[in-house]
């Protein structure tokens, strides 16, 4: 059975007989009986027409008591399904269940750990430690020795990707700075770029410069970005790409360096030792 709501500019359909409804108003009725797509349209219609819609619906169905009668009608049709479902329900727990799942994870020598098919990076200070990871719906907490040492946004593997990657280049740039030549063949390289312009810069460096020089320049740029210049450096790199110029690490370092303040010259005049002799005689 389908009932088309007489609402201008809307085509909302309510499908009856799908679920039991304990509601006493139309809003709860729609929540229990309307599919996800139709419910969005239904909610918009309710906001616009309000009580007029309920009156029209009651008139079309010919149900005494308006919406309450309509609710009883739907519940009667779904009663046999409700009996089957109630037999499978379990009682609610006495206490509120945890909102997270605890999973142990060990940080590798590369400062990463795997959590449910996703590779996460952590600061290098946690290398070798065994963390207790609490996975929430939207974020991940890393606990060590009863203390939360790191919070990360929860990541999931992309479509068609077997292992997801949630890499923060700021966690790994210290190790890259010590061995910049490893950047070209680094397995996490593509996931470490903070913005698309950094990836484009690396592609241009790899194509036009020797590998050693390209790696050193790119790692230096990531170090500058990790020092708090990520957005400003991205703008500079975009301008260089538009001008078809290669980045100069020394010039960019000087450009992003904090301005040097004028240090006032302070002249300190040291008194002679004879002055202390005069003070000693006065004290006597």
Image (cartoon, rainbow, N blue to C red):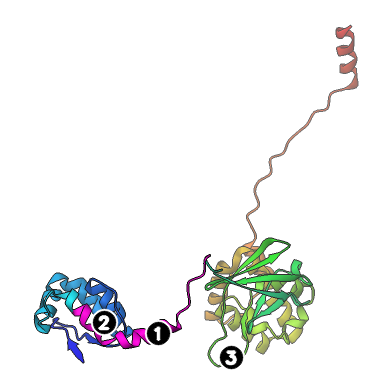
Mark 1 or 2 closer to N-term?
Answer: 2
Q: Is residue 114 above or below residue 132?
A: below
Asked if marks 3 and 1 touch (Cβ < 8 Å), the reply is no
On the rendered structure, is 99 left or right of 191? left
Q: Quadrant of the C terminus?
A: top right
Q: Is residue 224 above or below residue 29?
A: above
Q: Depth check: 127 or 238 in front?
A: 127
- Please report the bounds of the magenta region as a residue range: 70-95
Quadrant of the rendered structure where residue 50 is?
bottom left
Disc 3 from disc 1: Cα separation: 37 Å
Q: Depth check: 142 or 275 in front?
A: 142
Image point (67%, 66%), residue name: 253
Image point (32%, 88%), residue name: 80
The residue wearing badge 3 is 161
Quadrant of the rendered structure where residue 86 is?
bottom left
Give SS at disc 1.
helix
Tell me the tag on residue 75: 2
Pinpoint residue 244: horizontal percent, then vertical percent: 56, 82
Foreground mark, 3 or 1, reads: 1
Asked if marks 2 and 3 touch (Cβ < 8 Å), the reply is no
Pinpoint residue 127: horizontal percent, then vertical percent: 77, 71
Image point (48%, 77%), residue name: 90
On the rendered structure, is 70 left or right of 221? left
């Amino acid at each position: 059975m389908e009932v088309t709501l007489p609402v201008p500019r809307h085509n909302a359909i309510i499908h009856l007989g799908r679920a039991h409804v304990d509601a006493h108003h139309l809003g709860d009725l729609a929540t229990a009986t309307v599919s996800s797509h139709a419910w969005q349209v239904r909610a918009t219609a309710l906001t616009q027409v309000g009580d007029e819609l309920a009156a029209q619906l009651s008139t079309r169905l010919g149900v005494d008591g308006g919406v309450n009668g309509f609710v009883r009608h739907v519940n009667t049709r779904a009663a046999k399904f409700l009996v089957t479902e109630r037999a499978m329900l379990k009682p609610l727990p006495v206490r509120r269940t945890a909102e997270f799942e605890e999973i142990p994870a060990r940080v590798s020598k590369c400062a990463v750990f795997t959590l449910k098919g996703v590779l996460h990076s952590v600061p290098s200070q946690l290398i070798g430690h065994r963390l207790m990871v609490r996975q929430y719906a939207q974020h991940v907490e890393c606990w060590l020795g009863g203390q939360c040492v790191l919070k990360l946004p929860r990541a999931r593997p992309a479509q068609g990707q077997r292992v997801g990657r949630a890499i923060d280049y700021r966690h790994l740039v210290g190790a890259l700075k010590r061995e910049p030549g490893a950047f070209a063949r680094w397995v996490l390289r593509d996931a470490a770029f903070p913005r698309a312009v950094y990836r484009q810069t690396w592609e241009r460096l790899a194509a036009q410069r020797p590998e050693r020089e390209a790696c050193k320049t790119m790692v230096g740029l990531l170090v500058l970005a990790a020092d708090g210049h990520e957005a400003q450096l991205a703008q500079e790199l975009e301008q260089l790409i538009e001008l078809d110029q290669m980045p100069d690490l020394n010039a960019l370092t000087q450009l992003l360096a904090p301005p040097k303040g004028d240090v006032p010259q302070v002249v300190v005049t040291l008194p002679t030792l004879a002055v202390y002799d005069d003070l000693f005689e006065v004290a006597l």
